[in-house]
Image: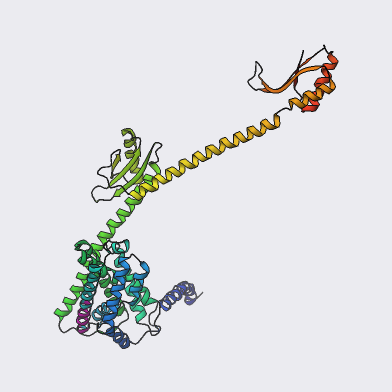
């Protein structure tokens, strides 16, 4: 065997890896259908400006999103996503950083600042005059940003710039990015916070918008660099260093606080689910009912509060409940049981109504079932009585035909207990009095007639 023959198998082993690597490069390549770099930059640059139709569209979208948050309508909020032009300056910032275009960065920042100001002003005015001031669930969802919001915005930004860099635009990508990144509702929620004087809502919602904007810009920057767009030279190395430091500062502002908030959200969710499972499994009492429970998460010590009605729960039972809590992951939680007086407790009236209604329904169903059972038993007893009742008058008349000297006659089925057994036996007792004494054969004749007539094998005949 030659040296080449010895090396041939080794070459064949590496060949599949080479093919697989080529397959992956071909499948995941972004060079296919790539739009001209100049056209992409011009398209994004045109979307940066907020004047004329873009500005009016932004105002209309803010009003629509504010109304959707006010009436808690996801469909209306989604409509505001689709017509919002806020993606333009945000992607413009990422593109400007990616190609070192300071003019584009400044222009995008200026227009984004104008858009944010107009959005806050519009939403604040709407919520100031709106008669509905209650914070609905759709609005509250925009007040607690987490690391998942940053991740969604980053991935949405990647999808948006990749789709925007194609020659044939993917029609469903940009609307999907607008919905996923949710730029409009946080600004509207921030306006609600300003209108109602709630700085917590304003800070949380504006931070969520900031997270989404920065992550979309970073995603645009990365894809632009990955596609190898030509970069302009910064005027001085100091300017370049300042831009880089600004980028890293923005990343830290987004990632660190949102990661901490996301961690706390996970802990809170796990605690609430564990508390719900504990109450459903361990708090089914016989003579008392849990009308309400509150799982309050706290970083130091969480609290599970139960409100009971019915007979007071003994202290030993409460201690038993506490001993079972570690098995549900609630070892560090404090259990508070409220029963009897609820003067200082905020009772959920709807939950109480539902609980009482459920108990009434269960009691009614149980009572109805018992009554149905009694009625069925009585019906069976009546049917049995009717079928087992003897036609005494008919029997007397028939016996009178056979024995004309009969004077008194009665018959009845009776239970007979044996002295050595508790199992009863059914016997038909027949009493007859005649005007003369009958022979044994005549008595046997009467018994056979009774057996044939009543279909009863056990007959006790008493004759006088």
Q: Is residue 394 above or below residue 137?
A: above
Please report the residue visible at 35 percent of the width from the left and 78 percent of the height from the top. 162
Residue 152 appears in the picture as rendered: yes
Instruction: Name the residue nearer the viewer: 195 or 452.
Output: 452
Relative horizontal placement of residue 194, taking residue 323 as reference (left or right): left
Relative horizontal placement of residue 66, taking residue 399 as reference (left or right): left
Instruction: Name the residue nearer the viewer: 460 or 240.
Output: 460
Relative horizontal placement of residue 292, taking residue 247 as reference (left or right): right
Q: Is residue 68 above or below residue 409?
A: below
Assign the magenta stretch its main secondary structure: helix
Color encoding of the figure: rainbow
User: Residue 126: percent from the left, percent from the top?
Assistant: 25, 70
User: Residue 393: percent from the left, percent from the top?
Assistant: 75, 25
- Quadrant of the rendered image containing residue 408: top right
- Quadrant of the rendered image containing residue 114: bottom left
User: Residue 385: percent from the left, percent from the top?
Assistant: 67, 30
Q: How many marks?
A: 0
- Residue 397 shown in magenta: no
Report the residue that reaches farthest toward the top.
437
**Which region of the structure is painted magenta?**
102-112
- Quadrant of the rendered image containing residue 108: bottom left
Please report the residue visible at 32 percent of the width from the left and 61 percent of the height from the top. 137
User: Residue 394: percent from the left, percent from the top?
Assistant: 77, 27
- Residue 103 shown in magenta: yes
Instruction: Name the residue nearer the viewer: 195 or 240.
Output: 195
* Quarter in which the C terminus is drawn: top right
Please report the residue visible at 28 percent of the width from the left and 78 percent of the height from the top. 58
Residue 191 appears in the picture as rendered: no
């Amino acid at each position: 065997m030659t040296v080449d023959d010895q090396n041939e198998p080794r070459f064949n082993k590496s060949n599949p890896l080479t093919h697989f690597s080529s397959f992956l490069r071909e499948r995941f390549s972004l060079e296919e259908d790539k739009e001209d770099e100049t056209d992409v930059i011009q398209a994004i640059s045109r979307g940066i400006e907020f004047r004329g139709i873009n500005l009016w569209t932004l105002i209309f979208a803010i009003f629509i999103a504010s109304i959707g948050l006010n009436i808690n309508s996801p469909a209306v909020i989604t409509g505001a996503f689709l017509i919002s032009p806020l993606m333009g300056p945000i992607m413009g910032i990422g593109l400007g950083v990616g190609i070192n275009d300071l003019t584009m960065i400044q222009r995008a920042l200026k227009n984004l600042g104008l858009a944010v100001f107009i959005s806050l002003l519009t939403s604040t005015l709407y919520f100031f005059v709106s008669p509905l001031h209650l914070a609905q669930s759709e609005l509250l969802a925009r007040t607690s940003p987490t690391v998942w919001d940053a991740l969604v915005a980053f991935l949405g930004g990647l999808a948006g710039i990749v789709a925007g860099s194609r020659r044939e635009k993917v029609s469903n990508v940009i609307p999907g990015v607008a919905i996923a990144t949710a730029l409009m509702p946080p600004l509207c929620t921030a306006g609600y916070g300003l209108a109602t004087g709630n700085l917590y809502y304003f800070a949380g919602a504006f931070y969520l918008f900031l997270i989404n904007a920065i992550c979309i810009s970073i995603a645009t920057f990365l894809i632009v660099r990955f596609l190898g767009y030509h970069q302009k030279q910064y005027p001085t190395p100091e300017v370049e260093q300042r831009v880089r430091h600004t980028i890293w500062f923005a990343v830290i502002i987004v990632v660190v606080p949102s990661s901490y908030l996301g961690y706390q959200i996970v802990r809170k969710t796990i605690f609430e689910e564990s508390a719900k499972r504990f109450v459903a499994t361990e708090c089914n009492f016989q003579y008392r009912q849990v009308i309400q429970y509150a799982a309050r998460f706290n970083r130091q010590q969480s609290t599970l509060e139960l409100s009971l009605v019915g007979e007071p729960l003994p202290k030993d039972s409460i201690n038993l409940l506490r001993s079972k809590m570690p098995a549900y992951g609630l070892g560090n939680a404090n259990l508070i049981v409220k029963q009897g007086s609820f003067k200082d407790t905020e009772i959920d009236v709807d939950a109480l109504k539902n609980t009482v209604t459920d108990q009434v329904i269960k009691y009614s169903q149980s009572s109805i079932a018992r009554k149905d059972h009694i009625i069925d038993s009585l019906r069976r007893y009546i049917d049995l009585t009717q079928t087992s009742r003897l036609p005494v008058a008919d029997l007397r008349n028939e016996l009178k035909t056979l024995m004309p000297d009969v004077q008194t006659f009665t018959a009845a089925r009776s239970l007979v207990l044996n002295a050595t057994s508790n199992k009863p036996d059914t016997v038909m007792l027949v009493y007859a009095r005649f005007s003369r004494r009958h022979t044994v054969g005549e008595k046997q004749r009467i018994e056979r007639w009774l057996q044939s007539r009543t279909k009863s094998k056990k007959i006790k005949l008493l004759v006088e």
